[in-house]
Image: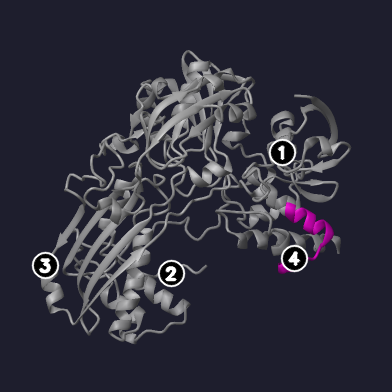
Amino acid sequence: MAKVPVQFTLNGSEKAEFIESGTTLLHALRDKIGDTSPKGGCHQGTCGACSVIIDGELRLSCLTLAETCNGADITTTAGLAEGGVLHPLQRAFLDAFATQCGFCTPGMIMAAKVLLDRTPNPSREDVVEALSGNICRCTGYEPIIQAVLTAARANSQSAA
Amino acid sequence: MELRKDYFADVRKDGLNEIGQPRPRLDSPGHVTGQTAYFADRNFPGMLHLKMVRSPHHHARIRSVDTSEAEKHPGVVRVLTAKDVPHNVYTILILIQIGPEDETVLADGKVRWKGEAVVAVLAETERAAQEAAAKVKVDYEVLPAVFDMEEALKPGAPIVNEYHGRNYYLYDSGDCRKVRFGDVEAGFAEADHILEQTYQSSPIEHAPTETTGCIVAPEGNDRFACYTNTQAMFFTLDNASIILQMPGSKLHFVGGTVGGGFGGKVDVIVEPIAILAAKLTGRPVSFIYSREEEMQISSPRAAEKVVIKDGVMKDGRIVARKVTGYTDAGAYSRHSPYGAQKGAAHYPGPYTIPNVWIDTYCVYTNRTPSSAMRGFGVTIGDFALEVQMDKLARLIAMDPLEFRFINAYRDGDMKAHRQLTEGAALIECMQEASRAANWPVADKYMAMSSYRKGA
């Protein structure tokens, strides 16, 4: 199988890899680069556990070919905490008991981050809509929604 | 949340000081930072991928298995069939003396459900394993299959599982699990009303976000590390030990965070074959269900049929209850004989009924083997019982909550299993529910207590 060079920025660091053509970004991140924070739940674009942010857009890494990410700026949940300080969303998920098994959590946090980056003061409906592509089977959606709303309030207070 | 510690404060010691205190979960920091290690987050150099060739038929005799083309496929390292498995016929609950062994690790001579594992293919990449698996040729003679419990129990029905020799599990108490208490026919004779209803359920898939799987790495010295998301570590270890005929000391099981299970990860399906593969190839092996496999192959909650006949008095007392329960085990036992047995224990409900007669059957069909799922054996039973309670209340024109107060078991009551009720709190729960749901009941019920002095 032909290998192709891919270069992108992952959580602020330059990454350069040779990967087999046709490799998904999910596989490249997890198996080549070693960032296992995106999870493979369905590998068919329905569960949202593999969600990452590519150039500001929420994307499913299981449906994104790594070779299409040349020059991209990619963010995963593993890169959110800065200098050991949790991102407000991470803090809120922790405090609001919004994680149970934790498998959907990285994807949920990515979806929530894209929402808050664009809509700092979302309504409950905005949050529900933003998380609608992410399946959770054990925590339950209500604590997750509350965590995102709490993080949004913390954001607006720190901005004020 | 309000905690009513005042209940029974004078009669029961409450030295607990953790309840009501918020405590952060120990694993949450790992979850929110993406650092929690799930089994599949490990990657070993030289890791092989295992893909299973599965039966396309519900019931068929295997005439021949030809793996020669698959073995020649680029990237294939080894192909495993039934003859490679040291102790190929097993059953999970044999560990607690519930037999007979009735399930094959890899099908031998016969398949009994659509999706049953027949041949395991090991290759350098997932893709090569998938492609090679498609090249395995299995010649089947399709046999008549049975998908319905009533059909399976009819004389002359195709025998699903020869290890049982009949389409139901034979308990040491006979054809079914039984509860006998009082004289149920005398109870019906004295009852003002009798209501018999049948309730049925379909199989339910757990659909965990993380699919079932394991990664096995040889540790040297003929010892193997098995990183798995099993929910039943020691069941898995001990069954693997039996299936592989290896002492437990050679098996190093590493569990950890499970990405959703709900009972769906207590079966012993992926680990033994993956350990065998690692042993025979000397290389790390990854066996992870695809989403499609998770939904179609993993054991669901059993389909159940429950027939409940109750005799009730005009004043609200249930005087007789007769229940026949059927649990669809699918083709193999797994945890279903236990589930059906739990049903027998559960059907009296949390109610005091003087005459009870219960039979529960564990039935084999050519469906996906069912197994554990959150309260299996009692969850569907509860659904049926409580719908029945509402219907009974309606029959005698009584408020359904007040009807339950009349029948609720209280300390000192004799249960149908001949055990005295102790530590009951149903009355108090219903009183709280009455307040919380704004569903008022008569004062006499609010004055009741589960606790009886001297009981």
The chain carrying label 4 is: A
Which mark identifies residue B4? 2
Is residue B244 on the magenta stretch?
A: no
Q: Circle 1 — which element?
A: helix
The answer to whether the residue labelled 3 contacts the one labelled 1, judged by CB atoms less than 8 Å apart, is no
Q: Give the spatial CA distance, label 3 vs label 1.
A: 64 Å
The residue labelled by disc 3 is B183
Q: Position of residue B321 (x, y in %)?
A: 21, 69
Q: Residues within 10 Å of mark 1 (few under 14, many from 20)?
A: many
Q: Which residues are magenta?
A: A111-125
Q: Amino acid at mark 3?
A: Asp
In the image, B139 versus A87, the foreground residue is B139
Quadrant of the frame with the C terminus of chain A: bottom right
Magenta span dominant secondary structure: helix
Which mark identifies residue A26? 1
The residue labelled by disc 4 is A126
Q: In the image as oriented, which residue stretches furthest toward the right?
A: A71
Q: Give the spatial CA distance, label 1 vs label 2.
A: 49 Å
Residue B36 in sight from this viewpoint = yes
Is residue A122 on the magenta stretch?
A: yes
Q: Position of residue B135 (x, y in %)?
A: 56, 27
Mark 3 or mark 2, earlier in chain: 2
Which numbered disc, 2 or 4, marks the residue closer to the eye?
4
